[in-house]
Image: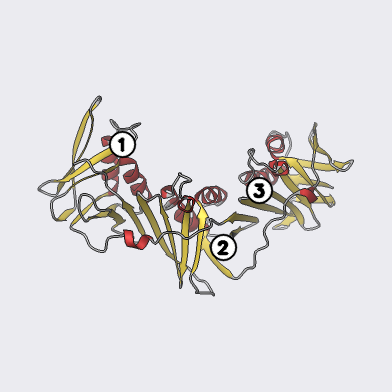
Amino acid sequence: MKFIVQRSRLIDSVQDVMKAVSSRTTIPILTGIKIIASEEGLTFTGSDSDISIESFIPKEENGDEIVEIKQTGGIVLNAKFFSEIVKKLPMDSVELEVINLQQTIIRSGMAEFNLNGLDPDEYPHLPQIAEENVFSLPANLLKSLIRQTVFAVSTSETRPILTGVNWQVEGEKLICTATDSHRLAMRTTSIEIANTDIVNAVIPGKSLIELSKTLDDSSDPVNIVITGNQILFRFKHLLFFSRLLEGNYPDTSRLIPAEHKTQIILHSKDFLHAIDRASLLTRGERNNVVKLASLENRKIEISSTTPEIGTVVEQLHCESIEGEDLKISFSAKYMMDALKALEGTQIVVHFTGAMRPFIIRSVEDDSILQLILPVRTF
């Protein structure tokens, strides 16, 4: 195998597939990146058996030659060393040549590296996915869907299914739900899909975080294919595979209250900053709880107390307060995470009592729902 490639494109592809490579794998060859040179261009693959990423560099793009293939073939190179070498090469083009079966020479300018490679035939094959349930989302919308839900997944392995985000396709609607049983984040969006049967997939939160890092903020389409145990995201020259979590995701619709006793509308950023200040004295505490109480004249009081440190109290003006008087306590971290996920300048909060879950939505956009369970302190 022998080829010459633009260094900038090589760096991009290597960095993309590196997101799937784990140093803590039980399969030694998976600490490497598989490189295949074909007549069409270069294909790079990284995998940790849960996530697999394939990046392709075509020979030509927009009339410019990016890769010169002198001899086809393949090799697996240690991902850590290869990525470090590529980043620090001196010139804009890189030559890679495999000699004596797996001896690999990397040249750029006057620099030359010699790496021992592995047989690409030993590298596990990527999943074969039948493209039946296919739909697409703009890259920037997909990034938003992930950002607005993934933070609410569970970090505990006691219920593995809750470490993922549930994607449910109903008709022409995609509903993304994440919960750790103390809070819930839900985002709904319209999609176009030929097969309108209900499709359910629970995608590991870690996979979605890595996927988000590979996407840009463009409106270019990402094609999404869901099968029984895998999901594939196809974006430009990138394929991102993730295994799906096994098991039934809990029915979260029963958690969401249908009615409320108190409604508060207020400015999102003001509320976020007030919660942030109130949590200053509880930061580092395991529960980091703040209290909210409704007052007269469209005001609320936000407070927190840490016995050995002190107390903070702040009053905040609201656009409106309707319904019963309220006193409630909740996690400051959960509230701040929820507020950061919402779009728009004003939020509406629906409370159904001091010990019942409450809902936060944007006034301008009801496609995002955040739910938090209160903490008993009063």
Residue placed most toward the observer, 340 or 23: 23
Residue 24: tell me if it is visible. yes
Residue identifier under label 1:
288
Amino acid, disc 2: Ile
Residue placed most toward the observer, 194 or 316: 194
Residue identifier under label 3:
47
Quadrant the C terminus occupies: top left
Q: Disc 2 and disc 1: Cα gap in Å?
A: 39 Å
Residue placed most toward the observer, 76 or 121: 121
Above or below for 136 versus 196: above
Q: Secondary structure at mark 1?
A: loop
Q: Secondary structure at mark 2?
A: strand
Amino acid, disc 1: Asn
Neighbor class of circle 3 (other Cα within 10 Å; few <14, some 14-19, many 20+) is: many
What residue sits 66% from the left and 48% below the top?
A: 47
Mark closest to the chain's N terminus, 2 or 1: 2
Residue identifier under label 2:
224
Residue placed most toward the observer, 179 or 367: 179
Neighbor class of circle 2 (other Cα within 10 Å; few <14, some 14-19, many 20+) is: some
Mark closest to the chain's N terminus, 3 or 2: 3
Q: Secondary structure at mark 3?
A: strand
Any mark on residue 177, and which? none
